[in-house]
Image: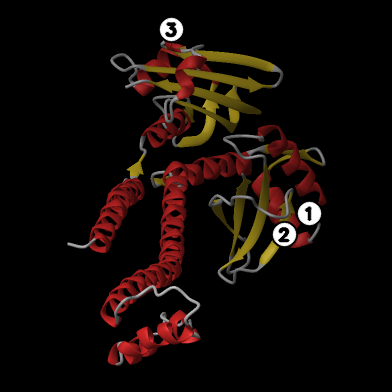
Amino acid sequence: MGSEDVFEMSKQMVLLAIVIPVIFLALILVVALFSRYADAQLSIRDLQQRFLMGRLLYSEDCFAFADSVVHVGVIDLRKFSSERMGKCVQAEERLLGMKASLQYGGQQKTAVVNELMMNREFLCEGEGICSRQRFYVLVEDGGKKHRGYLDVEVIQLE
Amino acid sequence: MSNNLFSFGKRKNFVSIKEKPDVVSIKEKQNGKNFVVFTSGGQMLKSMTFNISIKEKHNDFYSIKKILGRSGLGDALLYVWALGLLFIYIFVLIVMTFFANSQQEQLILSRMEQSRLNVLTYLQTPVMLDGAEVSMQELLMGAYFSGDFQEFDSRTREIFQPLYPRDGCLTWNLYIVSRPDGNEVHRIQNYRRNIFQAEAGKVLIPAVYEDRSLEVQLEDVC
């Protein structure tokens, strides 16, 4: 084996020593990249919380005013209480906190479920843990309808 | 010595001398003044062969080095180019890996439902008009038939202005569209170009005395 052959072989070896790890690195990066795209997430937590908030206004077991029919979006002021909201969202066995603030005609009323869960802003760092919504509502009070706004906050840890 | 003796680098001359070894020693004798370096043609030839081989090797070495140098430079450039491309590729991959987010699907149906809930409540809202209490739905119908939407607009703004910003949406647009023809009857537009247009909450109201309906669309501008 001549010196030129040795030189050529050593050159090839050096190149292989560089190229092979680089190819592996590229492959790992490609796999990492495409695995991220392939990872689809469907978050239903946000959806759950939105339905819970909507239930306050849709269900006559919650705050919705009902005579012969249920008036969606109309809050019966007599129903607006923390106990009723707790039963409505069935929060007893769940790590769920909910706060509803109703503003109408210069007045404000609040209903709270699992008070210990509320006022815990630091819990809201993760995605889908906290939700906050504002609804335009009508408030039924003694046969009269008033304009109002309902702010609902939900913290759900489970 | 003749010039022929200094032209050993050329194999042609060497061969010619090799063929007539005694010519050189004869020349040495004829000159007289010079030392006789080579006693015989054979010795001279050996020496010449040695010198030529060294010189040839020397020349070969430089020529090979030159050639090797040139082809080596080409190789090096090729490798640098290829490795450069590879590193750019890897850099792009790394950047993409850092910035790529996993695909997340959002269900916008719930947003639509909440907008729809707001529209439903809005249409039931009682307003006083010329001493009589009417709902926003009736006010809309009156405006549609009269063509005067001024009162309707101001009452609508009174209702929706305090509602926003909500759920990451800055403001709202309201469209009244005639169905089934799809003509836009009226609009209240607070923002001309939507950054993100969530699906609008829609409620259909039958238009009295006409074989059509009015669709009220509340669009969140997010």
Residue at the far left in the pictured view? A1
Image height of A62 relative to B60, above or below: above
Nearer the observer, disc 1 or disc 2?
A: 2
Q: Determine whether the residue tagged by mark 2 lies in a helix, strand or loop.
A: strand
Q: Chain of mark 1?
A: B
Expressed as whole percent of the image width and height from the top left, the position of residue B205 reads 58, 55
What's the residue at 61%, 49% (across, down)? B218
Instruction: Please identify the quadrant where the C terminus of chain B is shown.
Output: top right
Residue A124 shown left or right of residue B148 in the figure: left
Instruction: Give the residue type that dot 3 points to.
Output: Leu
Q: Nearer the viewer, residue B207 or B218?
A: B218
Expressed as whole percent of the image width and height from the top left, the position of residue B160 reads 69, 38
Which mark is on residue B186? 2
Q: Determine whether the residue tagged by mark 3 lies in a helix, strand or loop.
A: helix
Q: Are marks 2 and 3 in contact (CB under 8 Å)?
A: no
- The residue singled out by tag 3 in the image is A116
What's the residue at 39%, 47% (across, down)? B103
Q: Chain of mark 3?
A: A
Q: Chain of mark 2?
A: B
Which mark is on residue B149? 1
Image height of A101 relative to A35, above or below: above
Instruction: Give the residue type that dot 2 points to.
Output: His
Residue B152 shown left or right of residue B163 in the figure: right
Number of other residues with Cα within 10 Å of mark 1, as a class: few under 14, some 14 to 19, many 20 or more: some
Residue B35 in view (yes/no): yes
Expressed as whole percent of the image width and height from the top left, the position of residue A31 reads 30, 49
Task: Same chain for labels 1 and 3? Say yes or no.
Answer: no
Q: Determine whether the residue tagged by mark 1 lies in a helix, strand or loop.
A: loop
Instruction: Give the residue type that dot 1 points to.
Output: Phe
Residue at the far top in the pictured view? A116
Expressed as whole percent of the image width and height from the top left, the position of residue B182 reads 60, 68
Which mark is on residue B90? none
